[in-house]
Image: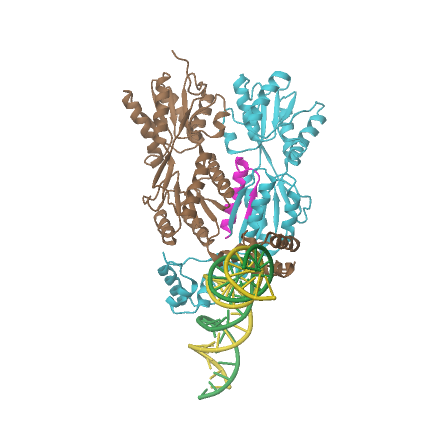
Chain colours: A brown, B cyan, C yellow, D green
DNA sequence: GGTAGAAATTGGAATGTTCCAAATGCAGAT
DNA sequence: ATCTGCATTTGGAACATTCCAATTTCTACC
């Protein structure tokens, strides 16, 4: 297993200088098309592979973007990560993705490793925790462009621009829709108390419920299917007057959905349900789940666009951006008018 | 924003030579503990960040592993990727993962980019397609250790060891269980005809059905929820005698599950159902879905172990390995004895 | 056949680390 | 004092590329 051929070997084989080969590598218009072709042929012959490390050493950043995501097992974030990665790849950037598993220490570790690998920008959907302050300081010190997406944990949005969905508007729309289709008592289910996102999704619900003269009822909990299932049973047992729920996200809603199936409550007819995120599965369960749709795919491309603009033209994004959301009404919430 | 401090700046600040700093970086036992402490302090003071590119240039591979996955949107593969990544990270490797989206060209592209980035090993759950042959040739030429996990697309398992689950045994177990609990006519639903995995999962089903003197019935299709839903309706309409199904994977099974709910067929009672993969959701739907469980998390750690052994000790894994599977019986298939 | 100007090509220098062989410091033995 | 052996430290070379300024080659025009 001989060592890999270098640019020099290629140059020799093609009868040109290393500089010319380098130029070809960068698709420079300076080299004659004919020469370029010759060089490319030599590369193929020798099985040359580009050595990014050397290039990076000499000329700094090379379009590598790091992405750190709090929970890649959650399909919503998976989808986000994938669409960012694909959009960046289409723009010629390579991406490295890591799961921080909601663990601030792990997050600091993987982010550090990315910085060492010479990423030229970071896209984070950060985990909450103590270690985050220090981490963002470190990023700031390294002078790296860094986007906080979907979650804002560092308040310095001038340094670390924040973008997310307009969850508050989503909460309002969902609540209004339920009220309009005849719900009397609506609960809000799931989400960790005190967290930014929970607060936002909740706020729309609270304002609309109150202005309709109803009492809000909130059941906080982990954003998981398992919690949703339990919640469905708890609600049926202890608060039978509640006839509709807005869930923190689709995972919870799907949990409630199967919890209802389990205890024989008919979703849509007996109990109306709206989730958040509109993950793929929501359209596939029966009865189909209504959800506040966050077009995560275009949000992902938009993220890639923001990062590319920042890196290429130095256009730092606005400190805060809210992408619009859209209520998708399916059978879990559409009720016959009475 | 001045440029980053280098090992030389640190050396100067600490009053030692660059070589010493380098040794500290590698945690060499050669440097006096006291000196090491001093150097580390200087690093912190200057905000030094390690430049992996330079290190890599000088000394070759630095524990970067590339992982290319055919479909990261599928929770089964997501889980796999995450557990490999975490296990590798615990062993001190960094990982870059990419989604090939079942597209052979994209796969070739991202894999190429990983090779350029200087990965010292590749873990693939490859996509099928024309471009794959050339791709594997390229990997072989680069002399990179490469594992084919979960799917075998290149026949040279001596070069690219293959590991997966013992799907055939899983198919047998599922079929036997259904027969034992009273199913008369069992269908096999989903999976693309002619593909290795489909073949394996199917083979167990076929052998058991035949040896029980029943006629097999296979409905090929995409491995998606949507197909499962349609299949449920088709089966009910055109083959009412079929009273059980083994699905290619849980996604399909969940689709059948919700399709049955839609047409009022009671899963578990009217129609027995077993999936493949045992993804988290299967235990969360109602009625709970039986599934052939593939312990993907330990399979992931095992993958990491294989790669580490190969890289560190030169122990190439066996050409083929089959991890055992386990049938998890839940309410979608347990039927009251009659 | 000469020449200006453009087009294409080229030889160092530089990048930040690791590796190697060699140098230094220090303790105890001669 | 000198030497021996060990622990620690060190300066230079090497790694594969890009950048820059300089050089060569080409083209068109007189």
Residue B76: say if magenta.
yes
Note whether B42 is above or below A110 in the view shown.
Answer: below
Furthest residue toward top: A338
Q: Is residue B328 visible?
A: no
Residue B326 place in picture, x, y as percent: 59, 35
Image side of residue B117 versus residue A151, left or right: right
Front one among A300 and B228: A300
Q: Which residues are magenta?
A: B66-92
Front one among B141 and B307: B141
- Tell me which residue sits at (64%, 23%) in the image: B186
Image side of residue B158 versus residue B86, left or right: right
Q: Is residue A300 visible?
A: yes
Residue B311: say if magenta.
no
Q: For the N terminus of chain A, which image quadrant? A: bottom right
What is the quadrant of residue C16 in the picture? Answer: bottom left
Front one among A318 and A160: A318
Residue B10 place in picture, x, y as percent: 40, 64
Q: For the C terminus of chain A, which image quadrant? A: top left
Note whether A2 is above or below A253 in the view shown.
Answer: below
Image side of residue B193 versus residue A95, left or right: right
């Amino acid at each position: 297993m001989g060592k890999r051929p270098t640019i020099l070997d290629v140059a020799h084989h093609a009868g040109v200088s290393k500089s010319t080969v380098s130029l070809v590598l960068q698709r420079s218009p300076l080299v004659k098309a004919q020469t370029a072709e010759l060089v490319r042929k030599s590369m193929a012959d020798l099985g040359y592979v580009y050595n990014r490390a050397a290039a990076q050493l000499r000329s700094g950043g090379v379009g590598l973007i790091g992405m750190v995501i709090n929970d890649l097992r959650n399909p919503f974030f998976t989808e986000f990560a994938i669409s960012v990665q694909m959009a960046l790849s289409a723009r010629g950037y390579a991406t490295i993705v890591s799961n921080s598993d909601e663990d601030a220490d792990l997050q600091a570790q993987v982010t550090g490793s990315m910085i060492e690998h010479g990423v030229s920008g970071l896209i984070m959907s950060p985990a909450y925790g103590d270690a985050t302050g220090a981490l963002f300081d470190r990023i700031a010190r390294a002078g790296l462009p860094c986007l906080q997406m979907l979650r804002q944990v560092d308040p310095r949005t001038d340094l670390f621009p924040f973008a997310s969905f307009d969850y508050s508007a989503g909460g309002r729309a969902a609540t209004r829709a339920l009220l309009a289709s005849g719900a009397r008592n609506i609960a809000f289910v799931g989400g960790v108390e005190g967290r930014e996102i929970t607060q936002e999704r909740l706020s729309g619900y609270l304002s609309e419920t109150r202005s309709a003269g109803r009492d809000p009822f909130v059941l906080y909990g982990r954003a998981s299917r398992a919690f949703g299932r339990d919640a469905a049973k708890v609600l049926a047992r202890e608060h039978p007057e509640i006839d509709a729920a807005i869930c923190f996200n689709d995972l919870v809603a799907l949990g409630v959905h199967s919890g209802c199936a389990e205890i024989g409550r008919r979703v849509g007819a007996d109990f109306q349900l709206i989730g958040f995120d509109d993950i793929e599965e929501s359209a596939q369960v029966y009865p189909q789940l209504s959800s506040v749709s966050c077009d995560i795919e275009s949000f992902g491309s938009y993220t890639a666009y923001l990062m590319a603009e920042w890196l290429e033209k130095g256009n730092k994004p606005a400190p805060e951006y809210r992408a619009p959301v859209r209520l998708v009404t399916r059978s879990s919430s559409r009720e016959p008018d009475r």
